[in-house]
Image (cartoon, rainbow, N blue to C red):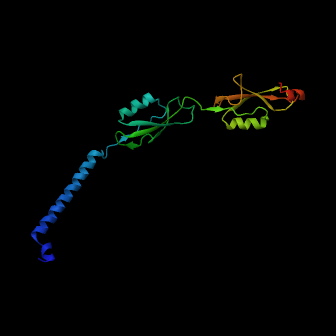
Amino acid sequence: MSFFKFLVSKTFLVQVVLAIVIFVSLIFFTKWWLNSTTNHNERIAVPNVKGMTLDLVEQELQNAKLRYYIIDSANYNPDYPRYSVIDQEPNADKFVKENRQIYLVLNPSGYQKMTIPSVIGKTRRQAEPQLKAMGFEIGAITYVDWIGKDEVRDLRHKGRKVKAGDRLEKTSVIDLVLGNGKGDYRDAISGDN
């Protein structure tokens, strides 16, 4: 039997038709299976949970049949309540499938604590930028008798003396006690105020 006669034989044609029917059936079955398992064209609008506490977020996302995962606590933002959501991914009003995980960034309980740098003995001009760079705010400036004009003699926070190495929340107000340039050089040698 020649190759050409085999191509036009009844056996070959039955096999080709059978292969086409199986192939088309397989495509339709695969399409049906994918639509049923991937929830094709079913989508949920992500609710806006920014500013909500975790209790409210959990309830809101359960109602929408979504899950959440806390990925981070960002820098403290005073515009939002403590432990509330300040960012979410995907954003509100985006469409997702059921049971999708929403990633949340929470507002911590307060500003991060920073270590007070060593500024005693430095001039006001040196100390202020260093403290501001750490996130502190400069409060009242008071002067004491000391030979070094504008030399930092003391640091205070809410009336209490603080020193290098103490930890205060970022944005805390630090009052500076400076020398007025009227002290005696003997005080400078002995280190007395």
* Position of residue 22 measured from the top left corner of the image (x, y, whole percent): 18, 58
In the image, taking residue 129 as reference, residue 7 lies left or right, namely left
In the image, taking residue 10 as reference, residue 58 lies left or right, namely right
**The quadrant where residue 133 appears:** top right
**The quadrant where residue 160 appears:** top right
* Position of residue 183 measured from the top left corner of the image (x, y, whole percent): 88, 27
Relative to 9, does residue 170 appear above or below in the rendering? above
> Going by the picture, which residue comes out furthest to the left?
10
Q: Which of 145 and 89 is in front in this view?
A: 145
Please report the residue visible at 36 percent of the width from the left and 32 percent of the height from the top.
63
Please report the residue visible at 78 percent of the width from the left and 37 percent of the height from the top.
125
> Going by the picture, which residue comes out furthest to the top?
159
Please report the residue visible at 74 percent of the width from the left and 35 percent of the height from the top.
128
Q: Can residue 14 be seen in this view?
A: yes
Quarter holding the C terminus? top right
Q: Is residue 170 visible?
A: no
Relative to 174, does residue 19 appear above or below in the rendering? below
* Position of residue 40 measured from the top left corner of the image (x, y, whole percent): 30, 47
Please report the residue visible at 13 percent of the width from the left and 68 percent of the height from the top.
12
* Position of residue 26 measured from the top left corner of the image (x, y, whole percent): 21, 55
Quarter holding the N terminus? bottom left
